Image (cartoon, rainbow, N blue to C red):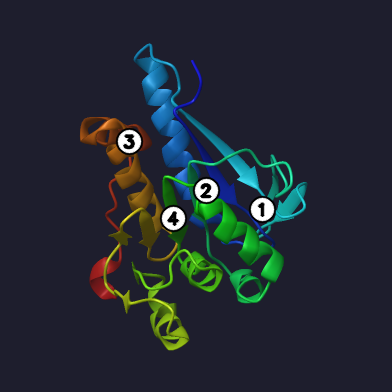
Amino acid sequence: MPAERTIGILLFEDAEELDFVGPFEVFTMSNEVMELQGKAAPDRIVFISEQGGQVKARKGMRVETDHSFETAPKLDVLLVPGGQGTRALVGHKPLLSWVDRVAADCEWVTSVCTGTLVLTAAGPARGKRVTTHWGFIEALRARGEASEVVENIRYVRDGNLVTSAGVSAGIDMALWLVGQWHGPAHARMTQRAMEYDPAPPYSADV
């Protein structure tokens, strides 16, 4: 049985690890839950970078990508993570052009953290309601490309565009997407399989 959808996660130098590892864990765990029920894994997840090969993320994690821009398959879902590397990407025309072109054919276009700045610079998030990491809310507003920048929220949907706040918020967004594709009950099973039930030990002190 072919995959129901192909999810492409864009990688680049100095991407923030949890921005892409969090959603990757959700999507792959969702597949595992399906398989434990005797069903075929419905989603294919691929890592894509501009040149292909290995990418070094912000904290030192090295990831061997599956495709370059040239060899990437048709995507149903595009996910753009954030991180220090996005500072350069917002002015990198080859990447922005690729993102804009690929996003036009996607069922869903998504970002985590400062990946939203890439989506606004590229085009798919212009004129849309979006969010990003709290530390970059004002920077995103100053760009003047989004119709509204929402703060104090984990993720925002505007049509087929879903943007999340920083880092761990991408997990919440990915679980919501899984619920859209496979139903809320399956999303809850995926969440339980991950034992994702945030209860930060020092949250009351912040």
- Determine which quarter of the picture holds residue 192: top left
Task: In the rendered structure, find residue 61 and report the number of the disc placed on it.
Answer: 1
* Residue 96 visible (yes or no): yes
The amino acid type found where label 1 is placed reads Met
* Residue 55 horizontal side relative to residue 7, left or right: right
SS type, badge 3: helix
Q: Nearer the viewer, residue 100 or 130?
A: 100
Name the residue carrying label 2.
21
The amino acid type found where label 4 is placed reads Thr
Q: Are marks 1 and 2 in contact (CB under 8 Å)?
A: yes
* Residue 67 horizontal side relative to residue 36, left or right: right
Q: Residue at x 61, y 76 (%)?
A: 87
Foreground: disc 1 or disc 2: 2
- In the depicted structure, whether residue 190 falls above or below residue 65: above
Name the residue carrying label 3.
181
Q: Position of residue 27 (x, y in %)?
A: 44, 37
Q: Residue at x 45, y 22 (%)?
A: 41
What is the spatial separation of the Cα atoms under label 1 and label 3, in whole angstroms? Answer: 30 Å
SS type, badge 1: loop
Q: Residue at x 33, y 77 (%)?
A: 147
Foreground: disc 4 or disc 2: 4
Mark 4 burial class by Cα count in 10 Å: few <14, some 14-19, many 20+: many
Give whichever of discs 4 and 2 has the lower sequence position.
Answer: 2
What is the spatial separation of the Cα atoms under label 1 and label 2, in whole angstroms? Answer: 10 Å
Q: Are marks 2 and 3 in contact (CB under 8 Å)?
A: no
Q: Position of residue 75 (x, y in %)?
A: 54, 41
Where's the C terminus, which quadrant?
A: bottom left
Mark 2 burial class by Cα count in 10 Å: few <14, some 14-19, many 20+: some
User: Residue reaching furthest top?
Assistant: 38
Task: In the rendered structure, find residue 110 and report the number of the disc placed on it.
Answer: 4
- In the depicted structure, whether residue 103 falls above or below residue 182: below
Give whichever of discs 2 and 3 has the lower sequence position.
Answer: 2
